[in-house]
Amino acid sequence: MLYPTATDWMNAPRKHVMLFGMSGLGKTHLANLLREGGAWFHYSIDYRIGTRYMGEYIADNFKLEAMKVPLLRELLLSDSVYISSNITFDNLAPLSTYLGKPGNPERGGLPFDDYMKRQDQHRAAEIAALSDTPHFIARAQALYGYANFVCDTGGSICEVISPDDPQDPLMTLLSAHVLPIWIEGSDAHTAELIRRFDRAPKPMYYQPEFLHTAWEEYQLETGHSPDQIDPDAFVRWTYARALAHRAPRYAAMARNWGLSVSAQEVAQIRGADDFVSLIAQKLPS
């Protein structure tokens, strides 16, 4: 690891970490807390995906919908209006909306092939954004003078690496520059995440094999053809399975390259000093 012992961590003049785990367990909250303390640079993978690597896809999709409205079509063709997304660290709705959900088009669903094409775009974008981490560490130091760095990953990082392969190229690259930290939820957290998702289901990225299997099994279970499937019902059904699918992958990432902290411990952090102390407790003395 980048910091083999608690002493190495505490004495390091530059502390570089990467937070990973399911969305909703506190990654962005913790990253914001560190950034607000004034000494940490916050690099958001989802923000980088939505601006640098998928921004054009997202904006073009907005324009495609706008072109269906005669007034907006005329204004777009005459360059009288400008359409773009307004992604922030805390509002990634444009990216989620673009990813979409498969199913009945009358319910806002996408044809499965189009859905998978967007999933592939996200996969390439996520790998590229994660690979940019060393560049942003250097950039944060050179431009802004930040010694400390937190990489705030999306919940799908475990889908774009091989967590059981200690030689995985992407994780090998990342672990040479940051300490990977898994924010691990309890069964109670899992139940709450499912309840929250049921209230407001949102698009997510999953491994192609996982999605193809889920799509086929859902059709068999419901007896619905692809164009009859309720997109929200499908992603709700898929989400609970995704939690079970991802948990062992996160655990393998922490085992092979980093460490884990509980979501409950993260919830008790009030500032950078609390975070630094917590990580020291998790490392060998």
Image (cartoon, rainbow, N blue to C red):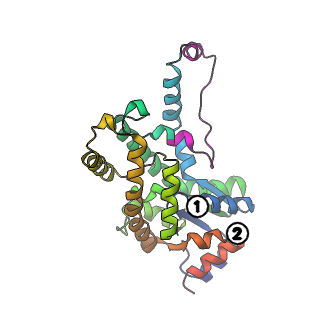
Image check: 79 left or right of 110? right
Q: Name the residue under label 2.
A: 272
Q: Which residue lies furthest to the right in this view?
A: 38
Residue at 50% in and 57% down: 195
Give yes or no for contact between labels 2 and 1 (Cβ–Cβ under 8 Å): no
**Dot 2 lies on which element?**
helix
Image location of residue 201, percent across then percent down = 48, 47
Magenta stretch holds residue 208: no
Q: Which of marks 2 and 1 is in front?
A: 1
Task: Using the image, determine if residue 119 lies above or below residue 141.
Answer: above
Image location of residue 223, percent across then percent down = 25, 43
Quarter of the figure with residue 30: bottom right
Start and end of the magenta stretch?
70-96
Residue at 49% in and 72% down: 258
Could one spot residue 231 in this view of the protein?
yes
Q: Nearer the viewer, residue 97 or 6?
A: 97
**Residue type pointed to by label 2:** Ala
Q: Nearer the viewer, residue 147 or 25?
A: 25
Image location of residue 61, percent across then percent down = 49, 30
Q: Name the residue under label 1.
A: 27
Gap between marks 2 and 1 measured at Cα: 14 Å
**Around disc 1, counting alpha carbons within 10 Å, would you say few (fewer than 14), some (14 to 19), or many (20 or more)?**
many
**Residue type pointed to by label 1:** Lys
Residue at 39% in and 68% down: 248
Magenta stretch holds residue 87: yes
Q: Nearer the viewer, residue 46 or 178?
A: 46
